[in-house]
Amino acid sequence: MPLSPMSSGNKNSLQRNPFQDVSEVSLTFSDNRLASLVFGHYDQNLAHLEQRLDIKANANGNHVILRGASEAINKARSVLESLYDRARHMTAITLGDVDGAVHEIEAQGSLFPSTRKKEPDDQAANTSGFEQIVTRKRGAIRARNAAQSAYIQALRDNELVFSEGPAGTGKTWLAVGFAVSLLEQGLVERLILSRPAVEAGERLGFLPGDMREKIDPYLRPIYDALYDFMEARHVERGLQAGVIEVAPLAFMRGRTLSNAVVLLDEAQNTTSMQMKMFLTRLGEGSRMIINGDPTQIDLPAGQKSGLIEASRILDGVEGIGHVTFSDQDVVRHDLVRKIVSAYDKDGKEQQSRLENTERYLERSRTRDRT
């Protein structure tokens, strides 16, 4: 077991009720600093784990006692052991990391095993569950759920990847992290970032400045992710040297993008013509990542989304990966997941009412004809 500097005691005979076995497990971590990272500021990570797994966790220094149903306690113990192992290479462990560890423990041995052959010298290899990416600034970043793990796997296995899903699922963040890891390994020479310049329902009017200053507001989420994975001075140096390029979608025509990672974000706002133009820019030695949320299309009414059309046309084409996230895969904030779920439910109900109305009208027209 990777956590040799830890001792534990198991008291399975704590008590028993008519409904379930109740267990108590005590864990002691040898490194106080790492234990503090695992437990979180004011034990917030333990409190979150209590809520997720319906257990009780009482910490004292580097010692924690877990009480609850046997199955939940075993999960909690595995989660804390996994987080303690990760803490050696991290400066903080967030609530999202706790959620990711819980998802990983639950997914191990289920429908999402890692099928990629792991080489001993492969620093992206992960023998304990979900896939991960590695950058110099952040170290190893592990997927927080099975969908993210499948996404990272698809990025490794395919030269072109479509990812669709709601906001907050980590599509853009992981794509930028993967692109940065390829750049740092010397597998590509450039990062090319693009996004349709489409306002989200309001008119911004004329934007002053040069091309980069005009397009920057639209690409801010990508910049935020870049600064997460790279030091600020490296980002600025890369922009100045052309290693990192901000390219408006409208200026892509006629180019061949070779030896680069090309990321198109908010692709649901591309037209059919724009998407075909963008896809045919792929050059030798390049990777292309296309992200979007089909439920947040800001195109004029009646105009088809290039993302939806391309996903349908290219489904099943060898060398092209498709990953779909759901509202259950939201990792940004639990409230965001609930908001997305509520909107999704309302959309399905409206669609159902519309279909019922159409069926009723069709039956009425049939009766009138007869």
Image (cartoon, rainbow, N blue to C red):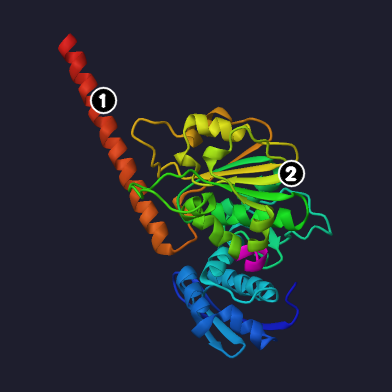
Earlier sequence position, callout 2 versus callout 1 = 2
Asked where in the image residue 170 lies, by quadrant, the reply is bottom right
The outermost residue toward the bottom is 61
Which residue lies at the image location 55% right of the left edge and 69% below the top edge?
98
The residue where tag 2 is placed is 259
* Residue 177 drawn above or below residue 7: above
Q: Secondary structure at mark 2?
A: loop
> Can residue 201 be seen by looking at this rendering?
yes
The residue where tag 1 is placed is 359
* Residue 312 drawn above or below residue 366: below
Q: Percent x, y for residue 19?
A: 44, 69
Q: Percent x, y for residue 311?
A: 54, 34
Q: Amino acid at mark 2?
A: Asn
Q: Nearer the viewer, residue 60 or 189?
A: 189
Q: Is residue 69 magenta?
A: no
Q: How many residues crowd around disc 1 within 10 Å: few (fewer than 14), some, or many (20 or more)? A: few
The outermost residue toward the left is 368
Q: Percent x, y for residue 177?
A: 63, 57
